[in-house]
Amino acid sequence: KNEVEQSPQNLTAQEGEFITINCSYSVGISALHWLQQHPGGGIVSLFMLSSGKKKHGRLIATINIQEKHSSLHITASHPRDSAVYICAVANTGNQFYFGTGTSLTVIP
Amino acid sequence: DAGVIQSPRHEVTEMGQEVTLRCKPISGHDYLFWYRQTMMRGLELLIYFNNNVPIDDSGMPEDRFSAKMPNASFSTLKIQPSEPRDSAVYFCASSPFFADLSTFGSGTRLTVV
């Protein structure tokens, strides 16, 4: 069993749609990260969360510690949002666990 | 700041050869991480350093892998001898604190033939 589960694995959306990517984890965490990896391969850290909600532009990340669940939302999606989104958690023992990623394609 | 700098960007080597990957973290970041990414296993943390000291190397797959951080501005990941199954993209990242947002390098794509 993976410590971090993401859903869906693949997602195709029309430009302008509201997108939600989910992440569930089974370990006690000190922080949860959302990463973005574009087809060119570079990885960008989008958010680090330990509680509540964060917003950056059209991206919103939420976390529910009690339910061990986080969501990444993209409002007014755009083709440039096409990427793989990876959820990662740092547990209280300073170990990292990674989800397998959600591959998002936004069609014009 | 130029960000996290990795070299080389691409490396093709023959099985059995020694491979050295290099990383320059962001100045002032106390944590440095080495990751490996493959299609089969996704992103995996290999080892991380705090203030140049290796803290957790439990992700290093075999004794063929070693990592050093001789000073705050430089780290190496060495594979000796290399094998075809080591082919992957290796990322280096740094952050001010362990669980803080990391800045990733562009990665080194390693192909062992």
Image: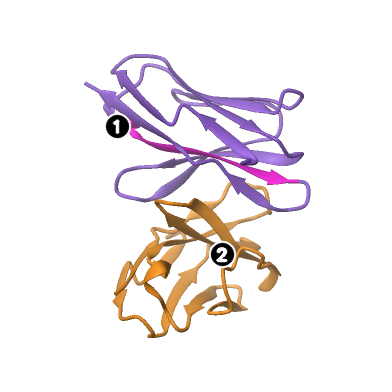
Chain colours: A purple, B orange
Q: Residue at x 43, y 48 (%)?
A: A43
Q: Is residue B32 above or below residue B112?
A: above
Is residue A54 visible in the rendered structure shown here?
no
| Residue at (50, 52) in percent of width and height | B43
Q: Quadrant of residue A62?
A: top right
- Residue located beneath label 2 in the image: B27
Badge 1: few (under 14), some or many (20 or more) residues near its Cα, within 10 Å?
few
The image shows residue B58, relative to residue B71, as above or below, that is: above
Q: Chain of mark 1?
A: A
Subunit of mark 2?
B
Residue A84, picture quadrant: top left
The disc placed on residue A80 is 1
Q: What residue range appears in magenta?
A: A81-91
Position of the C terminus of chain B by quadrant: bottom left
Judging depth in this view, the residue of B93 and A64 nearest the camera is: A64
Residue A18, given in percent of the width and then of the height, sits at 41, 15
With A93 as the anchor, is B6 left or right in this view?
A: left
**Distance (Cα) linking label 2 and label 1:** 30 Å
Residue A52 placement, left or right of B104? right
Query: Up-down: is A84 above or below B11?
Result: above
Mark 2 crowd level (few <14, some 14–19, many ≥20, 10 Å Cα): some
- Helix, strand or loop under label 2: loop
B21 w.r.t. A56: above or below = below
The amino acid type of the residue labelled 1 equals Arg
Residue B110 drawn at (x, y percent): 35, 68
